[in-house]
Image: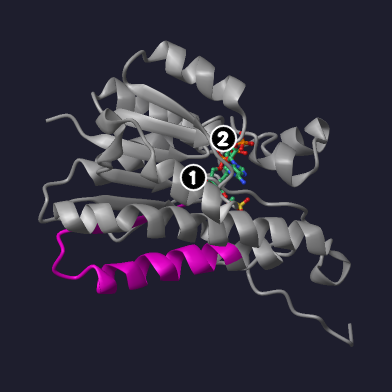
Amino acid sequence: MPKTAFVTGASAGFGAEITRRLATEGTRVVASARRADLLANLAADHPDRVHPLELDVRDKTAVEQAIATLPPEFADIDILVNNAGLAKGLGPAQEADLDDWDQMLDTNCRGLMYCTRAILPGMVERGRGHVINLGSVAGTYPYPGGNVYGATKAFVHQFSQNLRSDLHGTGIRVTCIEPGMCGDTEFSTVRFGGDQDRAQAVYKGMQPLTPTDIAEAVSWAASQPAHVNINVIELMPTAQSFAPFQIHRTEP
Ligand code: NDP
Ligand code: 8X3
């Protein structure tokens, strides 16, 4: 029987590639995001497989209504991919814009909560399902300017683990995918407020992960046998690793 997936943030980057990958594998996909024109293009490439859904995950009522009124052939969701998310800014906390912090919290945490809460009861009732959340290495490893973005991804990690506890015995699986730097998405353009030069400089002279790598991780986790739960996948470009602690010295 073909499966049905619900992917948030499907208009660009990881979400668009995950949608393409799942649809190509035979899964029906509800592809949601705010930009309806991009979703329409995606749906046109996968007739009957992809249902475009204009949705702002920050709108709790809209999330509940959208999920309650899906077309019957897309209504029984087996795989929820909570991917919609963003970073805004890379400045120090003492200079940050509170609206940027609010937008990250509202999208990365609250939006993910709303979609999960709306879709889980159906999964529990049917006795099957898989919640796949997009965390980040930024939720585990601190870096300058990561402040609230990293904190939202730490939330995603811990919420994923706690969901596993709540869903114990239901057969529903939960996976948190936690990538490092990934190119070919709008992530850095959004982070730097549309500054393309600054966004491109992030990936200059190194080979980042690609949306294909992330879609592969999603597909692999989702295709494990029912008795296997992949808790966390942390993946980074080989060119990215760790630096030592920084020490502020008051003497030379
Ligand atoms: P993109 O900016 O390319 O895509 C983000 C997607 O989220 C877009 O489709 C956007 O669509 C959607 N989105 C943003 N806000 C909302 C909203 N309020 N409601 C619904 N959809 C929304 O980023 P990536 O593909 O790179 O990132 C996807 C996820 O992966 C994010 O959660 C990000 O934090 C995470 N991640 C990214 C990494 C990277 O290096 N790229 C690394 C680790 C994690 P629209 O604007 O049309 O609504
Ligand atoms: C995005 C990866 O390293 O830019 O979550 O924070 S990073």
Question: Residue 218's x, y, as percent?
Answer: 34, 42
> Is residue 172 inside the magenta stretch?
yes
Q: Residue furthest bottom?
A: 251
Graded by Cα atoms within 10 Å as few (under 14), some (14 to 19) or many (20 or more), the crowding at tag 1 reads: few
Residue under pointer 2: 207
Identify the residue at horizontal 43%, vertical 71% (top origin). 158
Is 201 left, or right, of 83 in this rendering?
Answer: right
Q: Is residue 236 visible?
A: no
Q: Specify the quadrant of the image occupied by residue 219.
A: top left
Identify the residue at horizontal 40%, vertical 29% (top origin). 19
Seen in the picture, residue 212 relative to 59 is either above or below; the reply is above
In this rendered view, identify the residue nearer to me: 44 or 231: 44
Q: How many marks?
A: 2
In this rendered view, identify the residue nearer to me: 184 or 81: 81
Is 155 left, or right, of 127 in this rendering?
Answer: right
Instruction: Classify the position of the C terminus by image quarter.
Output: bottom right
Question: Residue 116's x, y, as percent?
Answer: 40, 56
Region in magenta:
152-178
Residue under pointer 1: 238
> Is residue 39 inside the magenta stretch?
no
